[in-house]
C-alpha cells in the first residue's frame, strides 16, 4: 500500500541521526541496551518498567542480522556486544528501523480495522491520517516501544465493534488477542480491552451469561498473549510489581523540573502538533457523527481516547507520546468525518472520491510538512556533535571537561570507526597484562603506555541525570572545577533551562558565576539564523517540531574558566560531586 510505504520511508529517512555519539535518554536506558545484555547473559531482559515485546524484537532482529544474515551484516568488532561497545551505529539503526516498521504496521492495522468497521474510503483516510500524523512519525524514528501499541489498539477496536454488532466469540478473541499485543508493548495499551468490556456490557441483556463468558475468554487470551510476549514475568513477579508500582508512583507524584503544569492543556496542545489541528477537529466531528448514529457504538469508539486522556491529565508528568495508544481511534473517527463530508457532494462516486482525497490532503498538510521538515533537520549535524568535534580538534585526549548530562557515555570515548586516531596506537604488552597496552600523549608531549584505552574526554559528572542535575549545583562547584583542572565547561540548554526552572538560588548562583568568571569559546545553536529560540519543552525540544530548528540538539555553549590550569587524564574526583538527594526524588532519576 502506497500510504504505508510512504509513511515508512518518512520514518527511516535520516534515522541514523546523531550516531555514533548521540541517542535519546529513553533509547539508551530502556530497550536496545537490554537486548544487547541478553547476548551477554540470558534471554531474560531483567527489566519491567516497560513491557519487553519491543526488546525481544530488537534481540531477534540482531540474532538474524548477525546469524543467518551474517554474510551481509558484518561485525568488525567480532560479536554483537563488542560491536555495541565499540561502534553501535548499525545496531541503533536496526532498533530504530524496528520502531519504524511497527509504526507502519500500526497504519496497516488501522486501515484494516476502519475498512472492516465502515468501508474502504474510511480505511484509506484513517491510514493516511495515522501514517503522516507527526507524533507517530516522530516516535517511529526513536528506538522506543510506544508505536508498537498501535497495532493492537487498532485491531482490538475492530474486534470490540464487531463483538457489539453480532456478539460472536471470534470478535471477542480478536479484541482480546489484539489487546494483549497492545499491552505487551505499553502497559497503558491494556486500555484496548475497555471497548470490549463496554461491548459485552451492552450485549448482556441480549446475550445473557454468554456475553460475560466470552468477555472472560477474550480477557484471558489477552493475558496469554501478554505472557507469551513477556515470558519471564512469572519468574520475577515481585520485581515486575515493584517496577510497575514504582513507575506509576513516580509518574503520579514526582513532576520533573521544567515540566509544565496542567495535564489537560498539555495534552490538548499535543494534539494540535502531534495529530494536527485539522485532524483533531475531524476526530471530534467523527465522534459526533457516530454519537448521532448509535451512542453505544460511539462510546466504544471514544472510550480509549477519553479514558487515556483523563488518566494522563491527572498525572504529575506529561509526555505527548504517552497519548499514542489513542491515535488509531483518533484517525478512524477523523476518517468518518472526512468521508461523510465528501458524501455531501451531489455528484457520482468519482467526484466524492476526489473530494475525500482533497479533504484528506488538507488535513495532512500540517503534519506532513512537519514530517519532512524534521527529517531534514535530523539529517544535519547535532550541536552536541559539533561541540565534540570542536573540543577533539582543539585539545589533547583525556581532556578534563565538565559536560552537562545531555549525552550518553559513548560521547566521551574515541572515534569508533575502527581506525585509531593519530594520537593513539598500541604499545607492547607488559608483565601481568593480558593484552598489549595503549600509547597516548600526556601534557608536555610525553607519551605513556597504559593498559586501558583512553577516552577523548575524562568524564566528570558522576553520572547525575538531567532531572536531578539541579541538586548538585551551587557556586562552590566553580571552585571544584579549578581545583581539579576542569577549565572547560560545556552547558546544554535542555539541561540548563530545566535546572534554572527548579528555582533553587544555588543553581542561579552557579550559572551567574560561570558566566562572570569565564570566556565563551564557542556557542553552537540549533536554530535558523534570525529565528527566535524555542523555550524548553519536554516534547518539542527533542522532536524539533518548531520551525525555528535548523539542526538537532540544544543550544550548546563552551566556556573556558579564567585563572584555571587545564588538567588531563582520569579525574581524581567526580565534578560536580553528587550529594545525597533530597527526599522524594526517585532513584531512577539519578
Image (cartoon, grey):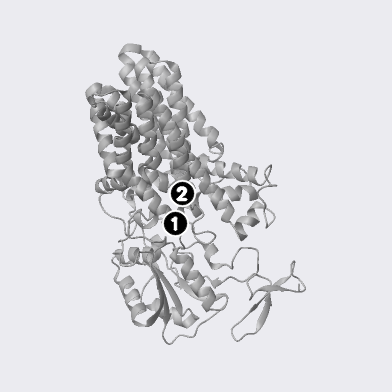
Q: Is residue 456 visible?
A: yes
Report x, y in % for residue 8: 47, 42
The quarter of the picture where residue 458 lies is bottom right
Does residue 302 lie above or below 538 as drawn?
Answer: above
Side of 581 relative to 293 (left or right): right
Q: Which mark is residue 161?
A: none
- The answer to which of 11 and 257 lies nearer the viewer is 11
Side of 178 relative to 517 (left or right): right
Are there few (<14), some (14-19), or many (20+) residues within 10 Å of tag 2? many
The quarter of the picture where residue 433 lies is bottom right
CA gap, disc 2 to disc 1? 10 Å
User: Which residue corresponds to the image point at 55% horizontal and 46% vertical from the top-left?
Assistant: 46
User: Which residue corresponds to the image point at 25% horizontal and 35% vertical from the top-left?
Assistant: 284
Q: Quadrant of the C terminus?
A: bottom left
Report x, y in % for residue 528: 35, 64
Side of 417 relative to 15 (left or right): right
Secondary element type, mark 2: loop
User: Which residue corresponds to the image point at 52% horizontal and 46% vertical from the top-left?
Assistant: 97
- The answer to which of 569 and 142 lies nearer the viewer is 142
Q: Which residue is mark 2?
A: 141
Q: Earlier in the sequence, mark 2 or mark 1?
A: 2
The quarter of the picture where residue 257 lies is bottom left
Report x, y in % for residue 432: 76, 71
Are there few (<14), some (14-19), or many (20+) residues within 10 Å of tag 1? many
Residue that sits furthest to the right in the current view: 431
Q: Which residue is mark 1?
A: 378
Q: Evaluate if marks 2 and 1 touch, with contact meaning CB atoms under 8 Å apart.
A: yes
Amino acid at each position: 500500500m502506497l500510504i504505508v510505504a510512504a509513511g515508512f520511508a518518512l520514518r527511516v529517512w535520516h534515522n541514523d541521526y546523531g550516531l555514533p555519539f548521540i541517542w535519546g535518554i529513553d533509547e539508551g536506558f530502556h530497550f536496545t541496551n537490554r537486548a544487547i545484555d541478553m547476548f551477554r547473559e540470558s534471554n531474560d531482559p531483567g527489566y519491567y518498567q516497560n513491557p519487553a515485546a519491543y526488546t525481544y524484537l530488537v534481540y531477534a532482529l540482531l540474532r538474524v542480522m548477525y546469524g543467518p544474515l551474517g554474510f551481509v551484516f558484518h561485525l568488525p568488532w567480532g560479536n554483537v556486544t563488542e560491536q555495541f561497545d565499540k561502534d553501535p551505529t548499525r545496531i541503533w539503526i536496526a532498533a530504530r528501523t524496528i520502531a519504524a516498521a511497527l509504526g507502519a504496521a500500526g497504519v496497516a492495522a488501522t486501515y484494516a480495522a476502519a475498512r472492516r468497521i465502515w468501508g474502504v474510503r474510511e480505511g484509506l483516510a484513517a491510514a493516511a491520517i495515522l501514517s503522516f500524523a507527526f507524533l507517530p512519525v516522530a516516535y517511529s524514528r526513536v528506538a522506543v516501544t510506544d508505536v508498537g501499541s498501535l497495532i493492537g489498539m487498532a485491531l482490538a477496536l475492530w474486534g470490540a465493534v464487531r463483538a457489539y454488532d453480532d456478539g460472536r466469540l471470534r470478535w471477542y478473541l480478536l479484541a482480546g488477542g489484539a489487546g494483549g499485543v497492545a499491552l505487551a508493548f505499553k502497559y497503558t495499551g491494556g486500555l484496548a480491552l475497555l471497548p470490549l468490556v463496554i461491548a459485552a456490557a451492552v450485549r448482556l441483556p441480549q446475550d445473557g451469561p454468554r456475553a460475560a463468558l466470552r468477555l472472560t475468554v477474550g480477557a484471558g487470551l489477552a493475558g496469554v498473549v501478554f505472557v507469551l510476549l513477556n515470558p519471564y514475568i512469572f519468574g520475577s513477579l515481585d520485581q515486575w510489581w515493584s517496577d510497575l508500582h514504582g513507575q506509576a508512583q513516580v509518574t503520579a507524584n514526582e513532576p520533573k523540573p521544567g515540566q509544565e503544569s496542567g495535564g489537560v492543556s498539555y495534552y490538548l496542545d499535543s494534539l494540535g502538533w502531534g495529530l494536527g489541528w485539522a485532524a483533531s477537529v475531524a476526530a471530534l466531528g467523527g465522534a459526533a457523527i457516530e454519537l448521532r448514529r448509535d451512542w453505544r457504538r460511539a462510546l466504544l469508539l471514544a472510550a480509549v481516547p477519553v479514558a487515556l486522556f483523563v488518566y494522563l491529565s491527572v498525572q504529575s508528568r506529561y509526555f505527548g507520546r504517552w497519548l499514542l495508544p489513542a491515535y488509531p481511534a483518533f484517525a478512524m473517527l477523523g476518517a468518518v468525518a472526512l468521508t461523510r463530508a465528501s458524501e455531501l457532494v451531489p455528484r457520482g462516486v468519482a467526484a466524492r472520491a476526489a473530494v475525500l482525497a482533497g479533504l484528506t490532503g488538507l488535513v495532512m498538510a500540517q503534519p506532513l510538512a512537519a514530517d519532512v521538515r524534521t527529517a531534514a533537520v535530523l539529517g544535519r549535524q547535532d550541536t552536541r556533535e559539533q561541540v565534540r568535534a570542536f573540543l577533539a580538534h582543539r585539545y589533547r585526549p583525556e581532556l578534563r571537561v565538565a559536560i552537562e548530562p545531555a549525552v550518553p557515555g559513548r560521547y566521551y570515548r574515541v572515534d569508533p570507526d575502527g581506525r585509531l586516531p593519530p594520537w593513539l596506537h598500541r604499545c607492547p604488552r607488559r608483565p601481568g597484562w593480558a593484552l598489549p597496552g595503549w600509547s597516548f600523549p600526556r601534557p608536555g608531549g610525553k607519551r605513556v603506555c597504559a593498559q586501558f584505552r583512553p577516552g577523548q574526554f575524562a568524564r566528570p559528572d558522576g553520572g547525575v541525570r538531567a532531572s536531578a542535575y539541579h541538586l548538585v549545583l551551587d557556586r562552590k562547584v566553580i571552585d571544584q572545577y579549578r581545583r581539579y583542572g576542569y577549565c572547560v565547561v560545556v552547558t546544554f540548554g535542555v539541561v540548563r533551562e530545566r535546572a534554572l526552572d527548579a528555582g533553587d538560588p544555588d543553581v542561579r548562583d552557579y550559572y551567574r558565576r560561570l558566566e562572570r568568571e569565564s570566556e565563551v569559546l564557542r556557542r553552537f545553536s540549533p536554530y535558523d539564523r534570525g529565528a527566535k529560540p524555542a523555550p524548553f519543552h519536554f516534547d518539542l525540544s527533542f522532536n524539533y517540531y518548531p520551525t525555528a530548528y535548523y539542526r538537532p540538539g540544544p543550544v550548546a555553549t563552551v566556556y573556558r574558566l579564567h585563572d584555571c590550569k587545564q588538567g588531563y587524564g582520569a579525574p581524581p574526583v567526580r565534578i560536580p560531586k553528587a550529594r545525597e538527594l533530597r527526599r522524594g526524588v526517585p532513584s531512577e532519576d539519578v
